[in-house]
Image: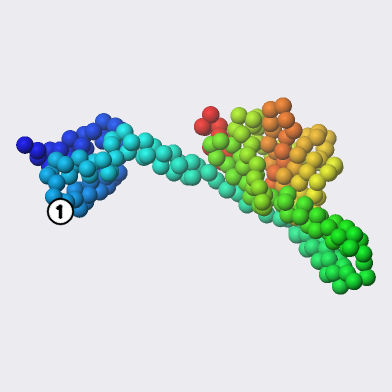
Amino acid sequence: MFDLEPAIAEWRQQMLAAGIKSPVPLEELEIHLREEIEHQMKSGLNEQEIFNSAVQKIGQAQVVQNEFKKVEATTKSMKSSLSFAAPWDAGVKLLTIFVSGILGYYILSFMHHRSQLSESDFLIGLVLPLCLLGLGLAFMVTSYAVDADGIMIRRLFWQRRIRRDDIVDVSVPSAICGRGIGLCGIWGFCGKSGFAYSNGLGFHIVAASGSAHRVVITRRHRLPIVISPSDSQAFIHAFNDNCLNAA
């Protein structure tokens, strides 16, 4: 004859055998199982059918364990991911405000004199400042993130991941303190991003929001990348803790 309590005890053993050893998840699952059994008591089925139906609804041991593993992996990834702001320095702020004011005045003035311009002249004159504004916003760095998979450079509309396996070193070398030459990109308007050259680094990529708190990401067989997290030392420690320890 079927006995409900021994059946629940055996179900608990199956869950333990599947690897659900933490008391809290197992207790929660048993509560849900008992609630489901109680809910089905009015269905007219016998206890064994009700128990089997409740187990099917809660999930078999291996299926439940797989779901728990997914949740734990996601939680671990979220906890280990650290974000760092990309603050503008005073120079970037002033230049961005100045250029934005000039562009705004130019666009408004251009719109005011639209009737005096041909259609082609109007479109050309309007597209150029809008393209400059769009370029600055598209490459503006908003923050950085470090997790077990590497480093993420976040921009306003898109982001770029630098894989852990591609990174040789993350440091604050004295070489980046020397003068560099921006070859192409944005240099002061909405940040500092593009290709550059310096005596210490040679050709490199800049994905920074300013000149302070610089950090260099040295990569395998690729150009180094210069970034500017809000706290350079904390950023390096986060990389060492998340990436090097996970390797």
Q: Is residue 146 left or right of residue 137?
A: left
Q: Identify the residue at image location x=72%, y=44%.
A: 207
Q: Is residue 65 left or right of residue 217?
A: left
Q: Identify the residue at image location x=64%, y=50%.
A: 143
Front residue of this view, candidates 176 and 37: 37
Q: Identify the residue at image location x=19%, y=50%.
A: 40
Percent of width and height locating residue 75: 44, 44
Percent of width and height locating residue 205: 76, 39
Percent of width and height locating residue 224: 73, 35
Residue 105 in sight here: no
The residue carrying mark 1 is 42
Q: Where 115 sits versus 209, above or below?
A: below
Instruction: Please tell me how crowded label 1 is: few (under 14), some (14-19), or many (20+) other residues with Cα within 10 Å.
Output: few
Percent of width and height locating residue 195: 80, 40
Report the amino acid beneath label 1: Lys
Q: Where 114 sits versus 53, above or below?
A: below
- Element assignment for label 1: helix
Residue 130 in sight here: yes
Q: Quadrant of residue 69?
A: top left
